[in-house]
Amino acid sequence: MKKTALIVFTIGLAVLLWAVPASAKEVVRSFRQQIPVGSAGSIHLDFPVGELRVEGWDGRQVDLDVQIVCNHSSSRCESAAKALRLVYNAAGGQLEVKIKDWPHWGGTKGLNVNATIHVPRNLPLKTDLGVGSLTIQGIAADVTADLGVGEVHVNLPQEAIGSAAIDTGIGEASLSAGGRRYSSEGLIARQINWDKGTGRARVKVDCGVGEIHVTLT
């Protein structure tokens, strides 16, 4: 009973944070930029709350189309949005892109990110999202995704992938690969581990509460 209450509370909180009809949202700021990868050997994307779509492409840049959205117009939300910074750092051989100066927990309700990001398909990708919806597709290298609460959808080329590890603490997980579908769901979902691929890349997806769906095609 306590676990069920936790699910309802957590998912309800996530809905308050980001799941609002598009007509109710107001774009307060936009970032449009291309960042050269240079000598970086991997990409790390780190975003707090919202909808994040990551697509692999043939370019040698990270292409950013980021909108900062207020679910309901208010001076408090707009002020918080204007204080945010989109920063990147290529130290240590990894290109990291993140939002800085996000308000502390409970500081501003309804503030979230709506982003579409193109990354080089052959570079390893690590993506962190606190709450929301994460979609990753077209990457032919290692993929690591970590979501606190929400949904993850991953679609990758099967010939590039050698193994996949999927773990959702509470919720539902599925993997479609090699003509088969593997699934797990419940209050304490089991991990899905698959190692029958012919490629070299590894996929690792974690979600605290919510859903994970990985498809290799």
Image (cartoon, rainbow, N blue to C red):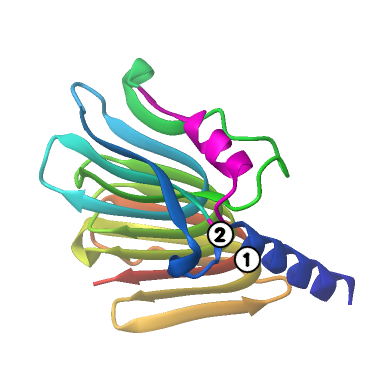
Give the side of residue 181 with respect to residue 8, left or right.
Answer: left
| Vertical side of 177 occupied by 74: above or below | above
**Which of the image's four quarters has the N terminus?**
bottom right
Q: Amino acid at mark 2?
A: Trp
Q: Amino acid at mark 1?
A: Val
Q: Which mark is residue 29?
A: none
| Vertical side of 108 occupied by 99: above or below | above
Give the residue number, with chain letter if any, for mark 2. Answer: 18
Give the side of residue 73 with respect to residue 119, left or right.
Answer: right
Instruction: Look at the image and say whether residue 217 sits in the magenta stretch.
Output: no
Toward the right, the furthest residue is 1
Q: How many marks?
A: 2
Give the residue number, with chain letter if any, for mark 1. Answer: 15
| Vertical side of 15 occupied by 101: above or below | above
- The secondary element bearing badge 2 is classed as helix
Residue at 70 percent across and 68 percent down: it is 12
Q: Which residues are magenta?
A: 71-88
Query: Looking at the rendering, which quadrant does residue 96 occupy?
Result: top left
**Which of the image's four quarters has the C terminus?**
bottom left
Query: Looking at the rendering, which quadrant does residue 4 occupy?
Result: bottom right
| Vertical side of 34 occupied by 9: above or below | below
Toward the bottom, the furthest residue is 180
- The secondary element bearing badge 1 is classed as helix
Residue 109 location, x and y as percent? 65, 50
Q: Is there CB contact under 8 Å for labels 1 and 2?
A: yes
Foreground: 213 or 89?
A: 89
